[in-house]
Amino acid sequence: MGEIDLNNSDIIFLTDVTANIKLAKNSELIIITSNYGKYNTINYDTIFSKNVKIDYVDNIITGDYLDFSMLDNLLIISRDVVYKNLENTMKADVLEYDMKTKNTKIYMYDSKNKVNIKNME
């Protein structure tokens, strides 16, 4: 469900959000769900918040806030990030993914804290 921002008709506020995204023609489908979203109809940038889940092939990433910017080619998920695949579970504060270069940065806000990685094998 969505409501148009009364102050800016280019912005739509969403609830119970599901987004299906393909980054390239032959790429796998990325499914993003969250309780809330804020969608810009001009540049397609979207902010997902509360119970954010990214499902991509055998990878699941959860967090509480996701800034998906088509303009900057960036996907940044933060706040209690948990990344799981078939072999590992990782916990961090932030995961940044550059959609153009496919580079990923994973880090903690406080450099004294460490990213926690657990191998499932």
Image: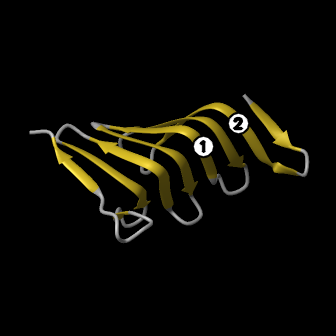
Q: Residue at x 83, y 40 (%)?
A: 4
**What mark, if any, has residue 68 been given in the picture?**
none
Residue 18 image position (x, y, % from top left) = 56, 32
Q: Residue at x 58, y 39 (%)?
A: 50
Q: Above or below — where is 111 with respect to 94?
A: below
- Amino acid carrying label 1: it is Ser
- Amino acid carrying label 2: it is Leu
- The colour scheme used to paint the residues is secondary structure
Give the residue furthest to the bottom: 111
**Image quadrant where one finds the N terminus:** top right
Q: Residue at x 23, y 51 (%)?
A: 117
**What mark, if any, has residue 14 been given in the picture?**
2
Q: Nearer the viewer, mark 2 or mark 1?
A: 1
Disc 2 versus disc 1: distance between alpha carbons?
10 Å
Q: Is residue 25 visible?
A: no
Q: Residue at x 42, y 51 (%)?
A: 24
Q: Is residue 115 visible?
A: yes
Relative to 66, 119 lies left or right: left
Relative to 21, 69 lies left or right: right
Give the residue at mark 1. 49
Relative to 41, 77 lies left or right: left
Which structural element holds mark 1? strand
* Residue 55, image quadrant: top left
Q: Nearer the viewer, residue 28 or 66?
A: 66
Q: Nearer the viewer, residue 91 or 26?
A: 91
Q: Nearer the viewer, residue 4 or 62?
A: 62
Are the residues at dot 2 and dot 1 in contact (C-beta closer than 8 Å)?
no
**Image quadrant where one finds the C terminus:** top left
Q: Earlier in the sequence, mark 2 or mark 1?
A: 2
